[in-house]
Amino acid sequence: MTPKPVNRELMMEWIVGVFMLVVLLALAYFTIVLGRATFFQRQYPLTVVFEDVMGLRKDDAVVVNGMTIGKIRSLRLQDGLVEVTADLNQPLQLRADHRIVIMATSILGGRQMQIEVGSPDAPLLPENVIPRGRRPYDLMEEAAKVVHEVRQALTTGGISSNAQAVVASLREITERLERGEGTLGRLLSDDTGPYTDLTNMVADLREASRQIREVSEQVARGEGTLGRLLADDSLYREASAIATNLRTVSERLAGGEGTLGKLLSADDSLYRDLSEAAASVKEIAGRMERGEGLLGRLSTDEALYEEARAALQELRAAVDDFRETSPVVSFTTLLFGAF
Amino acid sequence: MITREPRYQLPARGPAGHLGRHMLALVGNSGRAVIMLGEAIWCLRYVFTRRSRQAIVTQMYVGGIKSLGVITVVAAFTGMILALQTGLEMRRFGQEVYIGAAVMVSMLREMGPFMTGLILAASVGAAIAAQMGTMTVSEEIAALEVMSINPVRFLVMPRLVALAVMTPLLSFYSCILGVIGGGVVGLTQLGVPWGAYVDNATRFVENKDLYVGMLKAFLFGILIVTIACHQGFSATQGAVGVGNATRRTVIVCFLSILICGYIVTRVFYV
């Protein structure tokens, strides 16, 4: 069974119809996308009053914390202010320290309304209060203002007069230099005196630097006291040992060890002993000065001293004789002792 | 009456005479074309008759669906070229991500309707002029009038409706393809992610751009049909006259599309 021939006209109608339907559906979708329509989402209106909206337009974005949450519905000029109404996708609770400003979206153009709801500890903005937006930061306006200020400063702000004064000062300085006045002028104009002094000074400096370099090289080689001090670490070790000893001594002193420690300690028995001993010595010395006792007489009586001296000499002579004769006596004693 | 007796005129004298003769012919032809267009619009009251519906669908198929292939290629490569040229320049400033906006705005506002209009003028307009011209020189138009069949209602109105409907749709179709082609170039050649491309493409255009572009295409369709039918009906001198009518149709259509595009842009964007 052969299929029925396709009706060409019907086929054309189908093709045209399908094409139109597809394109119209795409057109409808595109229209919705470009219109940024939100048919099924609840909208929360927000009205803000600005002095200047800097070219903000209908359907521009409303941004909170960098997130787009709505778009501008309308702008209306009223009482010298611009009343901007925005449709938000979610409600906002503005605080008393909120901040609403219009920003440029890019350097290529475009504007958006940027909202900062405020700090959490600030009180809520009453619902019947219409928030007021801040004046937008216009880069071109700021640049124009800076240019105007610079121009004003150049013309009437004193920069010009200051520059003239600086130029006059420089001219005076150069004239003085040309006349050879002052140290720098003399240096520039006089080729003998200052130049010679400067040359000598440079030579002295060069010699001093050479000597310093030699000394530093000697020190680096470990020569001399300073070099050895830097190169040899025995001194350090000795100093360390001394410090150790001093610490030991100080510890012993602190601990009341030894004579000095006992002297420094809270126990004053040694001090009392020494005091008593000193008193005794003092008394003995007084007695000796007064010529009391043997030592006093010896120190005061010259005759006694001479007699004692003679007696000692005789005693020394007797001992010498005995020493000389003692080997003979001993030998004789041994010899005759055997019998 | 479409057909008329030929008018015999004395030869023009000098350049001024030729210029004046051409100016008069231009004004006269424009007037005849506008009158024919008005008559076709008047015939729109028959648009829902069975015969007219069938003729309109046929013309929509011939003029629109059969042009899809060339429009697809031209639109896709137009978007790709736009994206590449714009993207290469914007890459120097690190702004190549914005090629989506550039391609979308260009295609919707100007390039889509313009390219569609040119393609239809060169293909469909030339075909209409050739067909009408052949019918005119073979006195088929005169025969229709003898039989009390209005050639405007029978031939012009279905083509007018068909292109008036199909040109905006084809323009939108070419815009979509151009944007897709630009996105492919952005993704493969410029490293622009598809999401960022689409986001920027839809961020900087409005419905106004879309529908003003479609209005342009609508006007282009009307212009093409009007010029092509008028040139065809004005054909004389056999095959040579048909050829001249076809050539003039393409030239006049191109110029008219350019001028009309500028006027619409001037009206809606300035």
Image (spheres, helix red, strand yellow):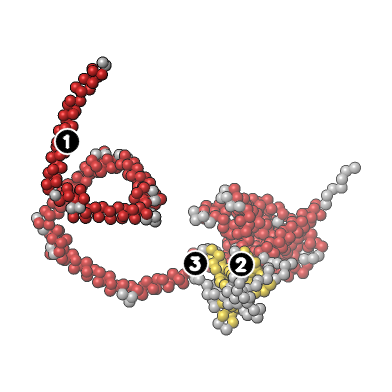
Labels 3 and 1 share a subunit: no
Question: What residue is at 39 percent from the left and 56 percent from the top?
Answer: A266
Percent x, y of residue B219? 65, 65
Image spot of residue A281 (x, y percent): 26, 52
Q: Nearer the viewer, residue B261 or B246?
A: B261
Sequence-earlier tag: 2 or 1: 2
Report the residue at 22% width, 69% height from top.
Answer: A169
Q: Distance between the Cα atoms at labels 2 and 3?
A: 70 Å
Check the picture and name the quadrant holding the N terminus of chain A: top right
Which residue is denoted by mark 1 in the rendering?
A315
Quadrant of the image occupied by residue B222 = bottom right
In the rendered structure, the residue with mark 2 lies on which chain? A
Q: Is residue B253 above or below residue A297?
A: below
For badge 1, the amino acid type reads: Leu
Amino acid identity at mark 2: Val
- Residue B15 locus on image (x, y percent): 49, 64
Q: Which residue is most to the front?
A: A339
Mark linked to residue B16: 3
Marks 2 and 1: which is nearer the front? 1
Cα separation between marks 2 and 1: 126 Å
| Residue B255 percent across, percent down from the top left | 58, 61
